[in-house]
Image: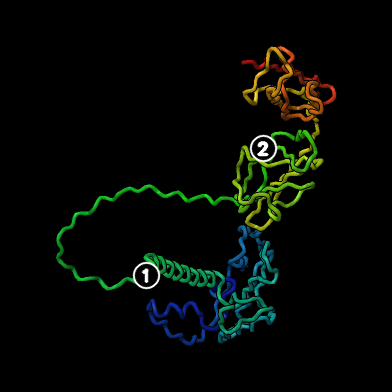
Amino acid sequence: MSEQHPPGTPAEGPDPFDELLKGLVEEPAAPQPVAPEPSVPSSADVPTVAFTPVETPPVVPPSVEQSPVTAPPLEEPTVAFAPPAASDAPTTAFPEPIPAAGTPSSGLAPTVVMPGSLDPTAATTVLAGGAGGGLPPSEPPRDGGFRDWDPRRKALFIALIAAAGVLLIALIVLLVVVLGGSGKDPGPTPSPTRTSATPTPTPTRTAATPTPTPTPTVKPAVQSFTANSNTAVCADTGAETNVTMRFSWNVVGNPTQIAIASAPNAIDAIANPFQNNLPATATDFQMPFACSNAQLTYSLTAAGPDGQHYSGVVTVVRQYTPPAPTNPTITQFTVERLDSNVCDPDDPTVTPFPRIRVVWATKDATAVEIPELPGSEQLSGSSELDYDCAVEGMVFSITATGASGTTPATGTTSILRPVA
């Protein structure tokens, strides 16, 4: 039987894998081929057993996994090979020529195609006369190139190259980790010097200083602004009549300036202040209300860091209530002697007569009447006269009249006759 070659092995030319291993393993020198001697065919050269085609496994690329395929049993020849007669045998054995790859020959064994093969043309051809294997007839050998290697050898060679690459990458990563771990190149080793032992100070634990939270920026605002009353009670509407009002406020947002003012309508108090640079909080701030105004609007304005002005307003309305009428009163009403003269008891007509004076004063009166003193209409005053020596004593009366609806006030005074 002829020697069989695995599928994919070139039929001729040097094997690259064998050349790679020549330097590692010394192989014994192959025996030199000996020229065949002529022989006479005999009955022993006639094959006694029918030729059975050899099953060849299909070629599977390394990257494709394929389950093993079992070839169906080949049928045995139905006719045994008949050896030629001795008379027909040649006197000299003629070496049977080996046909070129891809050339059909009637003496070649049949091409066996394995079931389940990836490529139907990838079959093993068994050549007559001991030649066999090789590439399919459609792809002749390429002088032993890498593409003509056995797939198993090619896979092994690729695996070795990949393993070498992985080891090289691992070595580079290890060097980077070792040399780059310290973050700097190792410096020269310092020479050892003798030093005295120094006690290591005990570390002192210090409290961490908290980071201050930034204060959010708040725009100024007049949170509250009120008056003790929204009504100013005026006794009259004269311009010189004022009523005192009291105000309270609270301003938030870190204002840069606060002012207050009053006007018939709301105004910017910072532009025309009654008083400026006020505190952010007040509880009893006094301002006048002029009763000549029917109403006044009080404005409290705060300026912010952004230059904007924010105001609060309070409106106060005048309430005119005339005072209740007051009854007149007599504050003074007297009579007194002015000299030392006296009356003559026997003749009351003897002169000189003693001189006397009447004095009076009133309040809230509109008119004064003293009947004993004609022409004395003054609300307050005095009058001199002679005493009437004909009478024992003189009596004076006064009446003070007030506004409508009031009760007049009355009073009396008297003096006795001056005698020695």
Q: Position of residue 189 (x, y in %)?
A: 25, 71
User: Which residue lies at the image location 59% right of the left edge and 46% below the top edge?
Assistant: 279
Q: Earlier in the sequence, mark 1 or mark 2?
A: 1
**Relative horizontal placement of residue 386, taking residue 279 as reference (left or right):** right
User: Which residue lies at the image location 41% right of the left edge and 65% below the top edge?
Assistant: 177
- Single out the residue that lies furthest toward the right: 404
Q: Where 3 falls versus 378 (above or below)? A: below
**Relative horizontal placement of residue 310, taking residue 98 as reference (left or right):** right
Crowding at label 1, few (<14), some or many (≥20) Cα neighbours within 10 Å? few
* Secondary structure of the residue carrying numbered label 2: strand
Camera-side residue: 357 or 20?
Answer: 357
Q: What type is the residue that disc 2 sits on?
A: Arg
Camera-side residue: 380 or 19?
Answer: 380
**Relative horizontal placement of residue 86, taking residue 308 as reference (left or right):** left
Q: Position of residue 305 (x, y in %)?
A: 62, 56
* Secondary structure of the residue carrying numbered label 1: loop
Q: Which residue is mark 2?
A: 246
Q: Quadrant of the N terminus?
A: bottom right
Camera-side residue: 63 or 110?
Answer: 63
> Mark number for residue 184?
1
Q: Quadrant of the C terminus?
A: top right
